[in-house]
């Protein structure tokens, strides 16, 4: 649970950067990667090492990077890199639930912005804040 809290803290800082500048700094991505590396090292030391689980937890981030490439950065590379870097610490199940919650929430907010004419169809909104909220909701659901 401590690694999930650390990832959530990094995502909150990244969300603030994403809202202000519409970019995710490299040091925040490396922060998630460092937490994941420590998590994996701890699992290796305790004998709970699951290399297949770690590799599978990279899939959502890789899919987001692929979607970013295909859609000409409609989803930014930083979003995918954050998901990729946080995957090993969270695991596929928690990361998947967090991303699904983030997509659902961002869809609702986008629809509301369009309905109330605060945004057009081409306006972009930062996704990392929704990832942070989705992860927070996922963590609360586990308690």
Image (cartoon, rainbow, N blue to C red):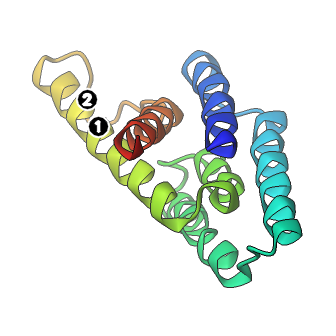
Looking at the image, residue 80 sits to the left or right of residue 98; the answer is right
Q: Residue at x 57, y 72 (%)?
A: 59
Which residue lies under the disc numbered 2? Answer: 109
Q: Give 22 or 9, whichever is nearer the viewer.
A: 9
Q: Nearer the viewer, residue 55 or 122?
A: 55
Rate crowding at label 1 as few (under 14), some (14 to 19) or many (20 or more) other CA atoms within 10 Å.
some
Is the residue 68 above or below the residue 35 in the image? Answer: below
Kind of element beneath mark 2: helix
> Where the N terminus falls, by quadrant?
top right
User: Vertically, is 106 above or below 21?
Assistant: below
Query: Looking at the image, which residue sits at the far bottom?
Result: 52
Instruction: Identify which residue is drawn at 62% across, 33% down.
Output: 11
Give the residue number, with chain letter if any, for mark 1. Answer: 105
Picture coordinates of residue 4, whole percent (x, y): 62, 43
- Which one is nearer the viewer's eye here, 75 or 35? 35
Residue 8 position in % (x across, y down): 60, 34
Label drawn at residue 113? none
Q: Secondary structure at mark 1?
A: helix
Residues under numbered marks 1 and 2 in contact, where contact means CB atoms less than 8 Å apart: yes
Asked where in the image residue 2 lies, by quadrant, the reply is top right
Residue depicted at 10% across the width and 25% down the height: 115
């Amino acid at each position: 649970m401590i690694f999930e809290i650390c990832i959530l803290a990094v995502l909150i800082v990244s969300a603030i950067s994403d809202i202000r500048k519409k970019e995710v700094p490299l040091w925040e991505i490396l922060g998630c990667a460092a937490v994941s590396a420590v998590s994996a090292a701890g699992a290796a030391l305790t004998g709970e090492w699951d290399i297949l689980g770690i590799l599978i937890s990279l899939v959502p981030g890789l899919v987001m990077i692929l979607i970013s490439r295909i859609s000409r950065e409609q989803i930014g590379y930083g979003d995918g890199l954050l998901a990729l870097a946080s995957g090993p610490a969270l695991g596929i199940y928690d990361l998947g639930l967090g991303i699904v919650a983030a997509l659902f929430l961002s869809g609702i907010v986008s629809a509301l912005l369009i309905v109330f004419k605060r945004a057009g169809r081409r306006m972009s909104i930062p996704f990392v804040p929704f990832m942070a909220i989705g992860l927070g909701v996922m963590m609360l659901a586990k308690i």
